[in-house]
Image: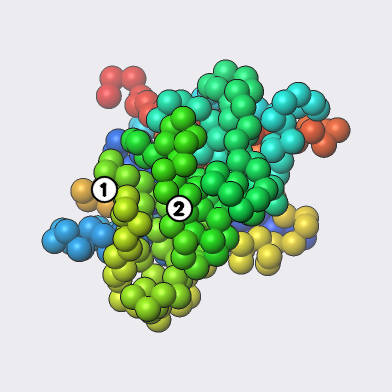
Amino acid sequence: MILPTAHPHRSAGPRHRHPRHVRMGIPLRQVACLLAIPVAYSIMASTSASGQEPVRASGAVTCQECTITLDTVVTIGGLDGPGVEAVGRMSSVAVDRRGRILVWNAAEAEIAVFDMTGGFVRTVGGRGEGPGEYSSISRIDAGPRYIHVFEYHQGRTVPDHDFNVIRTDMFPGQILNTFVTESDEVAFAASVPTSTSTGYRFHLLGESGNTVSFGEGAESARGATAPQDMFAAAGDSELFDGWIDLVDPSTGATLARYHGDEFLAGFAAGSRYVVTHQETDAGVPYIHLLEPRLSRGPGN
């Protein structure tokens, strides 16, 4: 289980430093990137629905000899070339089950597809209202059989891994964070104003488009802090630290922690890779996919 968290921290001096936490479980498997507390509660709620008591992750590191390192898997971006227009500071990333990297920007309606070497494969989508066309993409995630493309307040389009559209599910709501199960059900936390979902923050969207909503209702989600609130308070002169915690999902114990100076945008949807954005001195944006690796000291 991976439980991402974001905890604001203020340092001395005129500039503020906000740490970015990404909590990993065993095995290293992606759950969600951005909306920390609601998504964590969503995972806990689904665990409770199955009859298992939820486990709260602790912050104290229990293995002092354990070290997490981040190895660069691939870098995407550059001054020119096919697909690079999708790469920017606000780009989002998913990895499908064929190992292809899907990059999109919320302001665009196209998805740039790259291979694991960073080579451009194709562009899919486009602005429009036809099958496989989009107005504004909010989230992409990938399951064993399907790719799940969410639009702002437009619902979900489900193409297969050849990008043939299988179905479209129309419903309101802004879906920004998801977790796809091995049966291609999509778990997410959001306000969905439908007759069966109003008042609930946690939802399970089935392959056929049916939605099951549960949780303690919208009131229980008040006080949860989304990263966009943190960014709005940060201002233009902010710095960011990055953390990754490795958490045992059976006990909630934090086994190891990574702490670096770079800003970690979370896990690429559908993958075990961490996303980070960087720009050259000339302002050229790049996306890096990093693979977390765990090691222990000699003799352990």
Give whichever of discs 2 and 1 has the lower sequence position.
2
From the image, tell me which residue sits under label 2: 168
Q: Is label 1 in a helix, a strand or a loop?
A: loop
Return the mark for residue 221: none
Vertical relation: 118 (above or below) 142: above
User: Measuring 69% from the left and 37% from the top, which residue is drawn there?
Assistant: 87
Q: Disc 2 marks which amino acid? A: Thr
**Callout 2: few (<14), some (14-19), or many (20+) C-alpha neighbours within 10 Å?**
some
- Left or right: residue 90 compared with residue 216: right
Q: Is label 2 in a helix, a strand or a loop?
A: strand
Residue 296 occupies quadrant: top left
**Callout 1: few (<14), some (14-19), or many (20+) C-alpha neighbours within 10 Å?**
some
Residue 179 % position (x, y):
38, 49
User: Measuring 55% from the left and 22% from the top, which residue is drawn there?
Assistant: 115
User: Measuring 26% from the left and 48% from the top, which residue is drawn there?
Assistant: 249
Task: Say if residue 68 shows up in the picture.
Answer: no
Residue 12 occupies quadrant: bottom right
Residue 48 % position (x, y):
20, 63
Q: Disc 1 marks which amino acid? A: Pro
Vertical relation: 259 (above or below) 215: above
From the image, tell me which residue sits under label 1: 249
**Along the line of sight, which residue is nearer the eye, 256 or 130?**
130
Residue 182 % position (x, y):
28, 41
**Along the line of sight, which residue is nearer the eye, 224 or 21?**
224
Quadrant location, the C terminus: top left
